[in-house]
Amino acid sequence: MPEFSFLQQSDTLKRAEDQINILSAILAGGHSRLSFPAPLEDQYIAHRNQRFLDIDRKILIGGLLFYLAFSWTDFYLGGDNGPVIFLVRLLLSLSFLFFIWWVPRSSLNEYMVLFAAGGILIAGLSIIAFICMIPGELKYTYHFGLIPIQVFTMVALRLSYRAVMLVSVLLLSCYIATLLVTESRTGQNEIAHLVHFFIPVFILFWLLLIVMGGYMAFMTESAARSDFLKNRLLALEAERLQYLTGKLHYLSTTDALTGIANRRYFEEQAGSEWRRCQRNQAPVSMVMADIDLFKDFNDSYGHQRGDQCLRQVAQTLAAFCQRPGDVCARYGGEEFVLLLPDTPAQEAAALMEKARQAVEDLAVPHQHSPAGVVTVSMGIAALTATDGSSTDCLLSEADRMLYAAKAKGRNRVVVSAATAAPTVVS
């Protein structure tokens, strides 16, 4: 029996097409604000976080090792505070490593980008703190340590324009605030005089880095969002194509009126199951069923009631095809055919007698029927699949038995004497 689960969801195609239209409109309209409608934004953030965990976490580890590698300068330039500066750097590095390892394994993994931004900010603030702790003019060498922090911010957080700008602006603001407090106490020696020229140039250079980094982050996030939309569109188009392909297959193999298999599908399955049973030397039973006096039913109750009757009988017969290879199909008009592979004649006869009784138990009124209700006649033929036989022979014999059932008074099951002991079940 053909199955097409998408038909159980009548809005599947419409929903996919609506989403395709929405995504296409967003893609065509640009995304300069770097934001999507709420549900789509949540999906993008989850996608970005996963990408960050897969790729950028390694960049974080590399940057952390770079930060730790410069601990030798703490002893060389830090004076009496060198050991303290080194210890702070070491503790921060170990803490960051722990968070890089732990956060992806915890329920906080969706906040990995925020943790990374916070970690980079703390690393930058530690450099500013080290500047304040180093005595004399040697502290100015640590100013250059802020440049790698800024570059690392641009690289590690490139998928989030807001994170890049927030960390960069906060670091620069803290740096300037620290200068305003500490430089007022600087003496008037020659080095201090040079610093007054160096600091503005350094700040200007940093500002240029922030502008460049912000632009790069904006373009990178914009491209990432565009790729995300395109991938979503491809996935939706694939879903839509799968739906349409499934629907086309369903329509080509299913009887539109009754919802069971059509003759085309039956013939395909009959050939396939026959070949399978032929390899296993297994029996195949074929059943031809016909609604008794259906023309009289149509003439008396109308074609609308006739269609309803066909649907009821079809679904009742189909309910007795439980195994994967079993098929119940509408063969034409009020005639049905059932394929029962791996089923000997007597077993098929017992099963079809239950099906016949189930149709009668529907109690669909039929004033021209001897039973007073709609009934069916059935003919059964069974053969062991061999090279010298075919489904056509089996079908022809089952059809012959159907006419025998009608000749014997209808509402009965007749099994071919050529395939089993003569049986008439009334």
Image (cartoon, helix red, strand yellow):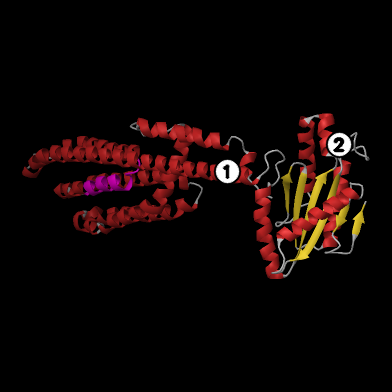
Query: Of marks 1 and 2, which one's residue comes earlier in the chain?
Result: 1
Q: Nearer the viewer, residue 46 or 230?
A: 230
Rendering coords of residue 163 (x, y %): 34, 39
**Chief SS of the magenta region:** helix
Measured as percent of width and height from the top left, residue 117 is found at 36, 44
Q: Position of residue 187 (x, y in %)?
A: 11, 40
Question: Residue 256, located in which quarter of the rendered image?
Answer: top right
Callout 2 secondary element: loop
Q: Are marks 1 and 2 in contact (CB under 8 Å)?
A: no
Q: Residue 94 falls in which quadrant of the image?
A: bottom left
Q: Is residue 146 magenta?
A: yes
Residue 109 seen by the camera = yes
Going by the numbered disc 2, the residue's amino acid type is Val
Tell which of 250 and 74 is nearer to you. 250
Name the element at disc 1: helix
Q: Residue furthest left?
A: 190
Mark 2 lies on residue: 364
Amino acid type at mark 1: Leu
Between residue 295 and residue 168, name the one nearer to us.
295
> Residue at position x 31%, y 56% from top?
62
- Which span of residues is magenta-colored? 145-160
Q: Which residue is mark 1?
A: 248
In the image, 67: left or right of 143?
right
Q: Nearer the viewer, residue 153 or 419?
A: 419
For residue 77, side relative to residue 343 (left or right): left
Q: Residue 202 has which mark? A: none
Within-10-Å neighbours for mark 1: few <14, some 14–19, many 20+: few
Residue 259: quadrant of the picture = top right
Q: Is residue 195 left or right of residue 182?
A: left
Q: Would you call the spot at circle 2 few (<14 residues within 10 Å), some (14-19), or many (20 or more)? A: some
Residue 318 seen in render: no
- Image coordinates of residue 335 in percent, x first then y, are 77, 45
